[in-house]
Image (cartoon, rainbow, N blue to C red):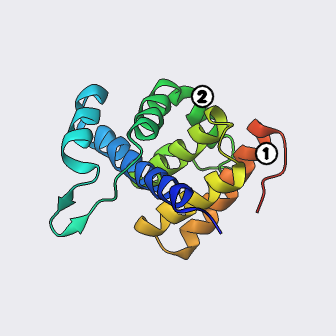
Amino acid sequence: MPSPKSRSRTQARAAARLAAIQALYQHEMEGTAIPALLHEFHQHRLGATIEDAEYHDADVHFFDDLVQGTMARLAEIDAAVAGKLATGWSLDRLDKPMRQILRCGTYELIARPDVPVGAVISEYLDVTDAFYDRREKGFVNGLLDAVAREVRGAPAAG
């Protein structure tokens, strides 16, 4: 059984992942500059209560890494994701939240070897639950698993 400290770290990282998806979505929709976006999330969203919804305290450094790292490596990430889409599909055909989930998950698989593959995939399946139904979870699972096999060189833990 995980210790209270590791549970709170896990929750803080889960909150950071969800917030990163929201921030990347906002960036794509509104074109908000990344520094301004990070500031907005730091000041007004992470750990806040907005319209009766309580946001968990997020691991701010992890959040920043996910957002900045995803944007810094966007071409590499998009190529990795696009390479795993079915023939005839492109990133542009995916709706915006799905695109951000796949980008953020792919970034973590590429750039965060300290996070086990199984944890990355599981966490992004949980994030997918916040936006979609079961069919989309299967899509996210399959795509991130394929990316993990390519970038980490080993079968994903499942």
Q: Is residue 28 left or right of residue 134?
A: left
Residue beneath the point at 19% across and 61% down: 49
Query: Which mark is in front, 1 or 2?
Result: 1
Q: Is residue 42 left or right of residue 9?
A: left
Residue beneath the point at 56% across and 63% down: 125
For the residue marked with disc 2, what is the amino acid?
Answer: Glu
For the residue marked with disc 1, what is the amino acid?
Answer: Arg
Residue 86 visible to an observer of this rendering: no
The mark that comes first in sequence, 1 or 2, is: 2
| Relative to 1, residue 143 above or below | above
Query: In the picture, which quadrant includes the N terminus?
Result: bottom right
Query: In the picture, which quadrant includes the C terminus?
Result: bottom right
Crowding near pointer 2: few (<14 within 10 Å), some, many (20+)? some
Q: Are marks 1 and 2 in contact (CB under 8 Å)?
A: no
Q: Residue furthest bottom?
A: 134
Q: Position of residue 102 (x, y in %)?
A: 54, 48
Q: Position of residue 146 (x, y in %)?
A: 74, 49
Q: CA distance from mark 1 to mark 2?
A: 16 Å
The image quadrant that residue 112 belongs to is top right
Crowding near pointer 1: few (<14 within 10 Å), some, many (20+)? some
The image quadrant that residue 147 belongs to is top right
Residue beneath the point at 74% across and 36% down: 151
Q: Position of residue 74 (x, y in %)?
A: 51, 30
The image quadrant that residue 90 belongs to is top right
Residue behind mark 2: 76
Residue behind mark 1: 149
